[in-house]
Amino acid sequence: MNWQYKPSLLALSVILLSACASQPTHNERVAELETVPSAWQQLPSSDKALAVEDNWLQQLHDPQVFTLVEQALAHNQAILQAGYDVAIKEQQLIAAGADLWPSLDLSTRASRSKDNRPVSYNNASSASLELSYEVDLWGKLSASERQANLEYLAEKATFEQSKQQLVADVVAGWFDVITNHKLLELYKQREQNAEKNLDIIESGYRQGLNEALDVYLARNELNTERSNIAAQQATLTKSIRDLERLTGQYPTGALSVSADLPLLDSAIPLGLPSELITRKPELMASWYQLLSTDAGLAYAHKQRFPSLNLSASISDGTDRVSDLFSPSSLAWSLLGSISMPIFEGGRLKANEEQARLNVKRQEQAYLATLYDAFNDVETAISQEQALKVRYEKTLEAQENAITAEALAFEQYQSGLVTYTTVLDAQDRSFNAQSSVIELKNQLIINRINLHIALGGDFSEANSEVAEQ
């Protein structure tokens, strides 16, 4: 290569690379998003946007759920796989960083040969020590290391999001077990009421006070309740097995839960929408993936530039191994070479264009993740408001339905209404009572989903946000 052109080539390459080096930071990209809301739509204007609180799990005040969460984080197969993914990315980062350092290779060879004319034996031994190094003249290797580093950070953020989701699933599964247990108790209570009613009706039938139709209806009601108990028992067992599966334990279905369904009516600090961007691990993972594709584009672009390689070697050859690397017989060489792609059939250009399109694609993926995160928060807020209203009204309906059920049976015994009226009142009472239990569970699950949507950690969060 003609060395008089090297300064001009270097200046031209620096100009070309300056465009790749000026990548916007996270905050700069966020500032470019014109549609980021300044406040949550469902938040009353009179309320202050308090900072999101972490350690939401401690609000439950139940040692059993804490133990289940610890078991899940330690034994759940999916979270263990995610942890290994992080470890793999870390090793890939180490491998990518090794390209920035020289490589030193040692090779030895020993041989013995026989010559029949005349008979003689020849021994030969050789050894060489080779040092090679590619000068990171254009920052190509640095771009590769940066890409690996960002992929590692993205995997770590994904792992944190997976842990938060696992804890949410365990807590939700725990409350599902409690809910199904409460419903089973309600079914058993209805079975007892059905047995009592059947005894009263059969006694009245034997005395000629009730009709045979009422007896058959009462027996049918009792059988229906017993059938419901069997179905609910199966549902409860399945929910227990699902919870044990989340905790990484073999699903024996033997977990015993005796807790109650709390009514979580305290307000949740919602923070600002802009704070969600740097707090939620899922968004940070998507952001790191975007930066990783930027680094991949820079690497693909710099592949088209010349490469400067330096190599040095020390070698020796002798008929005795003990004489290797004797100062009098050592041979050494030092070589510097520059290579530059001239014709690749459009491969390098296509790789760069592919990397550029990948950046564009990842930008849209990041925006989709961002706006989905906003939507999840807004949905959870509005859902909680609707569930609270439904719970209050259903609670009133439960009181009225229980009173109506008792009154209907009293009127039936007095001959004022038919037994079908009693059955109708009992159905309304049961529906209201079961709805209260299910709505309390829905309120709890929605509260958990809101914590996850806000990026609130289940423990004391470590606020380490690497600004790129």
Image: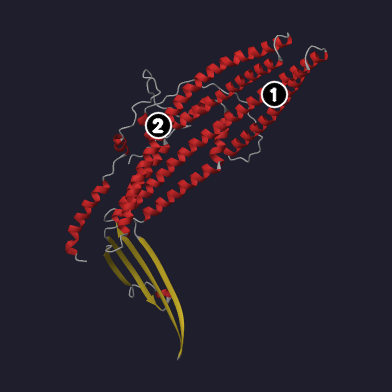
- What is the x, y in percent for residue 420? 69, 17
**Is residue 181 toward the left or the right of residue 38 in the image?**
right
Which image quarter holds the N terminus?
A: bottom left
Which image quarter holds the C terminus?
A: top left
**Front one among 361 and 73:** 361
Tell me which residue sits at (70%, 29%) in the image.
227
Tell me which residue sits at (73%, 10%) in the image.
413
Q: Is residue 308 visible?
A: yes
**Is residue 190 toward the left or the right of residue 40 in the image?**
right
- Badge 1 density bin: few <14, some 14–19, many ≥20, Cα 10 Å: some
Q: Could you say whether the residue bearing mark 1 is in a helix, strand or loop?
A: helix
Q: What amino acid type is highlighted by mark number 2?
A: Phe
**Front one among 39 and 94:** 39
Q: What amino acid type is highlighted by mark number 1?
A: Lys
- Examine the rendered structure and indicate whether residue 275 appears above or below residue 157: above
Tag 1 residue: 188
**Is residue 468 toward the left or the right of residue 111 in the image?**
left
Which residue reaches farthest bottom?
Answer: 118
